[in-house]
Image: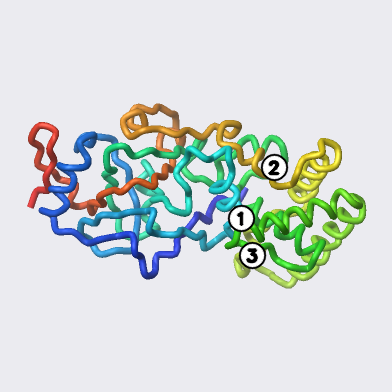
Amino acid sequence: MITNFKIFEVQENRIDTTPLSKDEANNIVKENCKDFNRKDKQIFRGIYLPKQPYLIDPKKHHRLSANADNYYNMIIDNSVLWKDYPKRKHSLIGTFAKFQAIPYGTIFRVVPFDGAKFGVVPHGEDMWQSFNYLYLKTGVGELNYVDVLIDDFNQALFEQKLNHLVYNIFTNQLTKMEDEIRKNYNVSLNKISKYYGDFGVKKDRYSNVFDSFDYFSRPGKEYYKKFFYYISDQIVMKNKSLISVLEDLLSPSKNGFQLLDYKPLLKREGKGADSVPEVWTDSKCILIPEFDLDFELAGNLHGFKV
């Protein structure tokens, strides 16, 4: 299973971060982060910013995944099953695993404002590999494959890509795909099989698969057939809509996700990779550069050691 590629965010022209002096950051922490303690288990975030404290307001920033088409983000952010969770597109993504933050830039410690709620990824350190229910039902073990597969199916049936920015257009395209599968399941499967056959011939020219990210990240025939069989059975035999099938496959409860406040998050236990999960929050936070994690401590008030 391919696990090398992680979700990178578009960082240019960020409007969600405000540079702070150490005194300004210290005063904000004292006033707004009373649940925080310097001895807390650390949440890290890597961002390409100069080393100084920042106030970050994730709701001002619209995240897009550079290495995926963003379909699963749209489904998650608009699904009623995820309504209580912070929206991924307006969230800061953090991790308890410091090494996971290193590729993303300067390492910061995340200090959340009081009242912050966190989505918690189960079964591993990264969102992409954490949907066990999806895997059990379809054999698809990486979340980005959902993006690739449904887009491939749409291109095979209609010779066009799905819309990855406008949710209503995206769901209308899914409905069109669903209607096509209902109308003639065998014809749809044949078109998709041919699409994958042609794709394989085209990509044979690559002597080294690492020359093509598209090739490297694309699920093969063992994925597309099982995935298609499952969704078509749900559509044709169970009379479900395609969007409802996808929402169910990505269900937070069925895949073991959690929604936790800051203190319960720190007390959460796990083994191995599950002990250092990816987390996300749409709360305002203070970002403290890694090498400024040396605080003065007076009661429950925390200042930077200058």
Reading the chain from its start, which is encountered first: label 3 or label 2?
Answer: 3
SS for dot 2: helix
For disc 1, the neighbor class at 10 Å (few under 14, some 14 to 19, many from 20) is many
Say whether residue 30 is left or right of residue 72.
left
The kind of residue on which mark 1 rests is: Tyr
| Sequence-first tag of 1 and 2 | 1
Residue 246 location, quadrant: top right
Q: SS class of the residue under badge 1? A: helix
The residue pinned by badge 1 equals 71
Residue closest to the eye, 116 or 100: 116
Query: Closer to us: mark 1 or mark 2?
Result: 2
- Tell me the crowding category of disc 2: few under 14, some 14 to 19, or many 20 or more residues within 10 angstroms, Cα based: some
Q: Mark 3 points at which residue?
A: 214
Which disc number belongs to residue 82? none
Number of residues whose C-alpha sits closer than 10 Å to that of mark 3, classed few (under 14), some (14–19) or many (20 or more): few
Q: Please give the name of the residue rendered at 63% of the width and 61% of the height, measured from the top-left corner.
A: 216
Residue 172 coordinates in the image, percent (x, y) = 71, 57
Whole-angstrom CA distance, mark 1 to mark 2, is 14 Å
Residue named by callout 2: 244
